[in-house]
Image (cartoon, coloured by chain):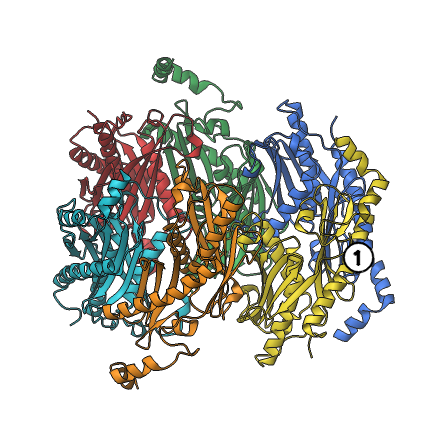
Chain colours: A red, B cyan, C orange, D yellow, E green, F blue
Amino acid sequence: MASLRESLADNSDFQKLLAEMPRSDGRKNNEPRPIRITPNYTMHAAGSILVETGKTKVICTASVEEGVPPFLRGSGGGWLTAEYGMLPGSTSTRKKRDTGGKIDGRTQEIQRLIGRSLRTIINLKTLGERTVWIDCDVIQADGGTRTASITGGFVALILALRHIQRKRKFNPPPVKQFLSAISVGIVNGQPMLDLKYDEDSKAEVDANLVMLDDHTIIEIQGTGETKSFTRDQLNTMLDYAESGLAKHFAAQKEVLGGYLFK
Amino acid sequence: MASLRESLADNSDFQKLLAEMPRSDGRKNNEPRPIRITPNYTMHAAGSILVETGKTKVICTASVEEGVPPFLRGSGGGWLTAEYGMLPGSTSTRKKRDTGGKIDGRTQEIQRLIGRSLRTIINLKTLGERTVWIDCDVIQADGGTRTASITGGFVALILALRHIQRKRKFNPPPVKQFLSAISVGIVNGQPMLDLKYDEDSKAEVDANLVMLDDHTIIEIQGTGETKSFTRDQLNTMLDYAESGLAKHFAAQKEVLGGYLFK
Amino acid sequence: MASLRESLADNSDFQKLLAEMPRSDGRKNNEPRPIRITPNYTMHAAGSILVETGKTKVICTASVEEGVPPFLRGSGGGWLTAEYGMLPGSTSTRKKRDTGGKIDGRTQEIQRLIGRSLRTIINLKTLGERTVWIDCDVIQADGGTRTASITGGFVALILALRHIQRKRKFNPPPVKQFLSAISVGIVNGQPMLDLKYDEDSKAEVDANLVMLDDHTIIEIQGTGETKSFTRDQLNTMLDYAESGLAKHFAAQKEVLGGYLFK
Amino acid sequence: MASLRESLADNSDFQKLLAEMPRSDGRKNNEPRPIRITPNYTMHAAGSILVETGKTKVICTASVEEGVPPFLRGSGGGWLTAEYGMLPGSTSTRKKRDTGGKIDGRTQEIQRLIGRSLRTIINLKTLGERTVWIDCDVIQADGGTRTASITGGFVALILALRHIQRKRKFNPPPVKQFLSAISVGIVNGQPMLDLKYDEDSKAEVDANLVMLDDHTIIEIQGTGETKSFTRDQLNTMLDYAESGLAKHFAAQKEVLGGYLFK
Amino acid sequence: MASLRESLADNSDFQKLLAEMPRSDGRKNNEPRPIRITPNYTMHAAGSILVETGKTKVICTASVEEGVPPFLRGSGGGWLTAEYGMLPGSTSTRKKRDTGGKIDGRTQEIQRLIGRSLRTIINLKTLGERTVWIDCDVIQADGGTRTASITGGFVALILALRHIQRKRKFNPPPVKQFLSAISVGIVNGQPMLDLKYDEDSKAEVDANLVMLDDHTIIEIQGTGETKSFTRDQLNTMLDYAESGLAKHFAAQKEVLGGYLFK
Amino acid sequence: MASLRESLADNSDFQKLLAEMPRSDGRKNNEPRPIRITPNYTMHAAGSILVETGKTKVICTASVEEGVPPFLRGSGGGWLTAEYGMLPGSTSTRKKRDTGGKIDGRTQEIQRLIGRSLRTIINLKTLGERTVWIDCDVIQADGGTRTASITGGFVALILALRHIQRKRKFNPPPVKQFLSAISVGIVNGQPMLDLKYDEDSKAEVDANLVMLDDHTIIEIQGTGETKSFTRDQLNTMLDYAESGLAKHFAAQKEVLGGYLFK
């Protein structure tokens, strides 16, 4: 049985066949899930959206507080930080809350990724001593929650900056480029875009790409979970991701009226 | 000025006047906010609802896991526990996450209240060694989040038990009575039902009542935040709460089809 | 057997019989345990007492420190906070110390109750930026430790304020009313005052009442542990509590010489 | 001024004078404070005492629980552990509770010392898989709380073992020797026995001695807080401690009726 | 001034000039630092090495313990986990120890990366219920500590497996490929291999590559710290990393005698 | 068997025989292990050494940071604190890292001992508001790690002070005496100097002595782990320790060029 599986893995006709088969939700390998962004989803935060990519649903809010972390006090500059959480009922097996005194490693990596990505497109030096909080809370998970958080967190950030500008609280720093993220991976030897949970959980390679709308990369992370991958495979994954992000940027532009700041 | 305020406080005509004035959202003192319960709000948990009382919105999910806490192992009986959280963006000032190693006292009191209330209406001895988790996550807060969590958590619990019954996972213990909760208080000397945040934050007395639909009490908590209160005032508050809960029970019955178990 | 128990529960003659039977220590249902307050029990704290209600013994000390928690800094006003602990040897089964990084929920609820109650009777705005610590440490537990802590903590507070006044450290804010607390509950269908541990552990309903000596209520908490209760039963419990508190106020007045401040 | 102090420090006549001057409470340098041990101080723990050395007061309880720490499970042998705490009001400046997640280093050293000392005199291998808890809680502190805890903890331990024997719970391991502890130090160049807080806080050298009644040493700890000390001074301190411990052993024997086990 | 910098950044002649200038330690942009691996550096752990890349020095030890984390108990398979630390004195500014209750995010990411990488090359299913601990402790840091930890940790792992095989403790699972890691980045617009601390701290892009000796990728992580990067730049970085890793594999093979298992 | 062991323990001829037998590494009972101190072991810390006593190896670094703990702020004086750690691979059974939120009691006692000892020989009042950190990290353990840390930490401290003086950062306080530490114990009834791990783990008595080179004592700690000891035995142990420390002082003087400050 194992030898059948192995011989199939090396059989290029079989691989070609696999590449043409539709995925469990009928998508092609290079096809992203539909994305929907609902602005002003809750009433309190300066910026607030619900982002849905397929069945994955994340509430992203952006809030601005006076004050900065200790390492920036007196610098005159600001900070942006992100927090990420999953509601206990958001996953098929209930997820324990992160309240026991330490955040698990996965959560911490995701928070750091979201914050690091969004910090690159805003000039924190001109924000004043203020902190932007991007909160991403998953209410329903079906793969790709971290990339949805970045795509949605970006929109919440812009909404918050516009709100501040409109309320004349202070003059927010401009953001000049759209930023979005998507996942990609290799499943059964096939590069595949925007993995659902059932695909993600059996992927041999799992990657995330954060890009700007000028086709440059902000962050690439690719991990051979069970197999290593070649540079050719990496290039195919990057091609898929780029094409998928084009749809994300379109969705962001639609909900934001096509511009960042007027 | 203070003496004017004080003399008005003792002036029964002025109090009568106050009693007749509508509240900031036009309600009468004994009028609850509209309640809406959306069943099956998310797809993973066995039971899941969104409860809205006015602008307060809480997602309640109920999950059942095999296993019980150490103090029940080997007893053959089960457990029900509740967790409560507020999304950071759910309040007007961003709420820090409870991840720093300890849950704050308010959160703990609320969790204990929700769990204690719901444990009274389910026979945990016949549940088997399983744990029911009731997760209440506030996505938008405008006062009364703990009582909304109880009212909504009850429905999520029933939905979860029905789901288990339908899937023939095991035979869940019956629940025989409806249970709901509402807040009541004294603002400007006036007993008032179902306080919004602006009322709650200036209330002299703050109380919560958990009742069954046979008019008996499961829990009463009343605190003189800035003033003590008389037994007469307590009785008025109880009258108000009873009438408000009638509407909650109606909403629960509507979404549950009028019955608990068939 | 169960049906006998149930038919007895509904049998009013049997209930009347129960109501007339003495309790395990010979008390009537509406009779509190003897209370004894020993002032100046230890030498260091500004105020210090030992309070005994029956076999329950609690050391209460009140200390005043310069400084306030962060949320009050710069406000010019003060703060009062309470801490509660049980010596490990104070209970029949050794109680684990609260040193493992988190205070258990019960302890936290009790601390919050004691602090909240005592804050209502002192004008913290005129205290200056100082913090009053009320420490309640149970050295022997037999039910009612939280209410004994409030009754005793009140006396320790007054002694501390007098000490400060006498030492001319600063001019403490006046306290104008006596405050005390007592427990009440329903055991075997019978409302019962000031429950001992053996009664408390089998009570169907458990309630605590904090009152001023003008018969107004500062806090009421009533929980149906295993059964819900009617408003009539609530009223009987409130009647019992009021009569019991009269004896507490008398004990406080005796040890304080009948007055609060001269 | 400093030179006067220094020249006096080297002046042997002055030192001789100092040696003859009485201490702040009138004691001679080699004179211990009166010790008093009250047995059965609280009702729940198997063994319970109040120990007073001068104004220092410590409640010591001994409890025996089934079960042992993980490293002993399956060994058939038992364990003895000690915990030490100070009530917040026990010191002249209120002591913060050890609840913030970590025990301070001083507390931990004291707990380890008490436990280590008492473990040497009991054959834990014949205790069965049980744990003896020695809880020492200081209700009033005036120096020497750790040595009082050892002296008192020993008596609580014996009372607990006798209680177990009397109740025929199991056959406790015999204890064959009395054990006690006392502090000693160097103040103003003078070796001094059983330091009160005012002496302790200005001592140049601070030492504790735990001994058996056969004049052998279980533990010696001597620290030059501000000055180093010679072996001659060490010997004088050991002489003082031995004579002081004779009185402790007498007090232990009196309260225990002169024997350990019958 | 800023405009000069900007115009230079876009000036291709200036970029060419920069590309030909030697780095602060005289290396070319695509030249790695010398690597040295000292086997059997300490005596207790099953496998132990000191790895030096330039001035960066890391002690890596590999230990094997019986038992696995809870999620694998009963599975029959094993686990490999890595821990990473920096001695406080290893950096130019003293690094606080990770003892305050939580590991910082950077440490956690590094530990996860090391463990994830090494888990891919060992068949944990045939390890039995045992855990391999890879401990990487930086004693001197000058950039690239995480990649040095992977390169060195791999050798410690092989040494440990050989030790187990030699001692006939059990039959360890074979490892079939060499694995190593190196850093790469973009500094002043120039792709650059194996960054020292002074280069790393001003890099615009920071990347790490973990590869097998068959030229396939196990993990790629690239972050635009202050600038995004193009796919062309990514390819140059990958070329540099591949050539640098060839020298790492050579060093590993030399110290291991050219083979993995005999 | 036990009675043979016991009769041998009391047999003075047998004891004499034991006293003359060489130890497992061929040393006499009063012979210390060779000590080696390598200065400037790492490049970043102001002072840095590797100390080896036999197979025990400890890296000690001394760093000076601006600022002091809260209790000294505004005092103008400085602080010295020590931290101690063992690399996980430094012991025969892997040692868990101290990252789980609390430092174990042994670590804390050792840190306190190192810090307390070194604080006695430096005038912190003239250091300015600065903190000296002494970090002692064991890379290979074979008994006596705490005393090696003190002996080595002293040298790191002097090197750091000299570095500060040379760099004219500020004028460091002078240190006037050499300080060193050594362990001593009783094994099989025999007093023994500088215990290796195999001796330490079966010692009846375990002691540590910290002394100055004028033969005065800074700290003595002696614990009867399994047996009590007499004052005669204590004196023999002190004699051994003094002679062993003479060799430590010689090693310190050699590496420091025979002087403390010029």
Image coordinates for residue E166, horizontal then vertical, percent = 59, 56
Depth check: give the residue in front, F119 or C36. Answer: C36
Residue at position x 71%, y 37% in the image: F121
> What is the three-letter code of the residue carrying label 1?
Pro
Residue E189 visible to an observer of this rendering: yes
Q: In this rendering, is residue C109 above or below C235? A: above
Instruction: Indicate the position of residue C160 as horizontal and vertical percent values.
Output: 49, 50
Image quarter of the N terminus of chain F = bottom right
Q: Which residue is mark 1?
A: F191
Quadrant of the rendered structure where residue A135 is?
A: top left
Q: Quadrant of the C terminus of chain F?
A: top right
Dot 1: what SS? strand
Is C128 on the left-hand or right-hand side of C184? right
What's the residue at 26%, 84% (across, down)?
C13
Between residues F245 and B85, which one lies in front from this camera angle?
A: B85
Q: Is residue A201 visible?
A: no
**Is the residue E174 above or below the residue F135 in the image?**
below
- A74 vs C234, left or right, is right
Tell which subunit mark 1 falls on. F
